[in-house]
Image (tube, rainbow, N blue to C red):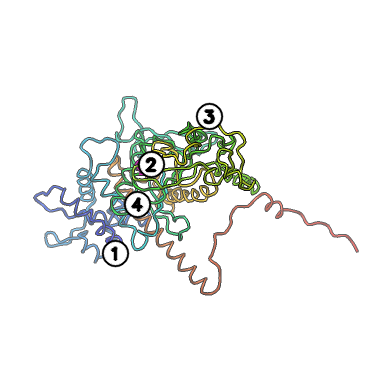
Amino acid sequence: MGRLEAIVDGSGVADRIEVLLPVGPRPRQLSVRTLLVGMLACQTDGRPAHLRRVHQALLGLSDTDRARLGVIVEWNRRPHPLTYRQVEYTFGLVVAAVSKPDPDRQPSELLAGIVDDLVEASITGTYKTASTSLAVDWTDHESWALGPHSDGVTADPEASWGRRKSHAVGEKNEVFYGYYLSAAVTVADEGGPVVPELIRRITLTTCSADPVPALVPVLARLAASGVTLGDVLADSGYAHRVAAHRAAPLRALGANLITDLHPSDRGPHGTFAGATAANGNLYCPATPAPLLHIGPLARAASSDQTTEHDQKTGETARYKLGPITARDPDGYHRVACPAATGKVRCPRHPDSMTLDYQRPTITDPPDPAPLCCTQKTVTVPATVNLKTAQKHDYPSKAWRDSYRRRTAVERAYSTLKDPATNDIDRGWCRLTGLTPILIFLSVTVAARNLRVADAFEEKAAADQQRAARGLPPRTRRRRRKTLANHTAANTPPQPTQAP
């Protein structure tokens, strides 16, 4: 209980909400602080997000805690326990105070700040500065209400129809009625120590709104709070959006983008100063075309295919115009011809022809020579490769190793949809409207962060004990069994020959 109260007090949201609520002739027995503590206790126990369960969680506290939190007070010279109607009444006041007068598919600024502070308060100690990298993604959150009838009437008018991945055989996508939940999850920095995969920020939007630009203000508030934005990892669903809605503002915040390019964004897309713009970089105009059309490595690739793929991407990097300067605050930077930097052999640069033959040789340079061949360096504005530029060359081994961290956000959603803890699928919350659902989601994420941090610390302590005894860290048992395993297990014994 002390940890839950520390989250509420550390966030400071209870006092900010309390001053917004109306004051009646009779004081309310249930304060906003106690309500939030009860919601956290309800979610910590793995109960559904029902106000009835919040009421039961508060009544289930010890006598000392109930008296201290105002769950039981003296009224008319006898104890008066908290009623469900008081929980419902106070929660309704909170929702009305932090909602927008005219809903517009996204949370209000006040509600967004409250959610940020509640989630941030659940991250304690050194975990706040353990990493600067984030993995982002969105998932579906189905409303308890059904979709609109033929007359357009529905119990949740703020929700809308959206699409999600279907688990049915032969069906790729399916429609649902509800919201999109977006999250930013902490992941380890490149070459950094392992960190717990804590959810740092969340937001909720109706399905009629694009969840990608809705997450950018959330990350902007995170950066404004003093948190340094490092690598931001996202899948092709984020990379395919308009650059002004995601890539440009995130780069302005100082983030390094690591994304899986959408198939329509891969390969050559125009030129600049004669150089070919492809996969977020500028390449020599004499670059072999097959090298510019290399896609990401297949998931089931063999070791030989992996080696061949890495060799090809490594050869492609030799044709890339090398950066001479870092990007300035306006996004401009300078690059130089690969022959001038000694990566390829080109007759237009006689000095490069003295290099060894392990470097590619350009036998047919473009004629007439473009600016990228005649000038020593070329100034590249921010508008070139604005949507596709990222930290590592796509789809090189360095990019693949870094992008592999993105699966942390998928694991985060799996913990939020785990029936053994808090399953946020349909029916978990039977309230309707964006504001009440987002408030419950924020305390659920806070409770989830506590569980993940405890499990991480428990495993770290166990590994230290094993290391003190000279044992390696415990690894997860491989559960997958192939056909060869079953074949070996069911092979009948061979008959033995008589002597």
Tell me the mark number nearer the camera, choosing from 1 and 3.
Answer: 3
Tag 1 residue:
2
In front of the other: label 2 or label 3?
Answer: 3
Label 1 amino acid? Answer: Gly
The residue furthest left is 25
The residue to which callout 4 is attached is 444
Magenta range is 246-251
In space, the residues marked 2 and 1 are separated at their CA atoms by 51 Å
Sequence-wise, which precedes: disc 2 or disc 3?
Answer: 2
Query: Which comes sooner in the sequence, label 4 or label 1?
Result: 1
* Residue 33 image offset from top left, x and y in percent: 22, 56
In the rendering, which numbered label is found on residue 332?
2
Image point 46% across, 60% down: which residue?
194
Place of residue 57 in the rendered image (x, y in percent of width and height, measured from the top left):
30, 57
Dividing the picture into quadrants, the one containing residue 140 is top left
| Badge 1 element | helix
Look at the numbered disc 3 and give the secondary structure of its residue. loop
Residue under pointer 3? 368
Coordinates of residue 2 in the picture (x, y in percent): 29, 64
Q: Earlier in the sequence, mark 4 or mark 3?
A: 3
Q: For the view shown, which residue lies furthest in the bottom direction?
A: 469
Task: Tell me the kind of residue under disc 4.
Answer: Thr
Residue ID at (25%, 42%): 108
Magenta span: predominant SS is: helix
- In the visual, does 292 lie left or right of 454? right
Viewer-side residue, 206 vs 186 = 186
Q: Nearer the viewer, mark 2 or mark 1?
A: 2
Which callout, 1 or 3, points at the residue further toward the start of the chain? 1
Which of the image's four quarters has the C terminus? bottom right
In the structure shown, which secondary structural element does the residue marked by tag 2 occupy?
Answer: loop
| Image marks 4 and 3: residues in contact by CB distance under 8 Å | no
Asked whether the beta carbons under mark 1 and mark 3 sit within 8 Å of each other, the answer is no
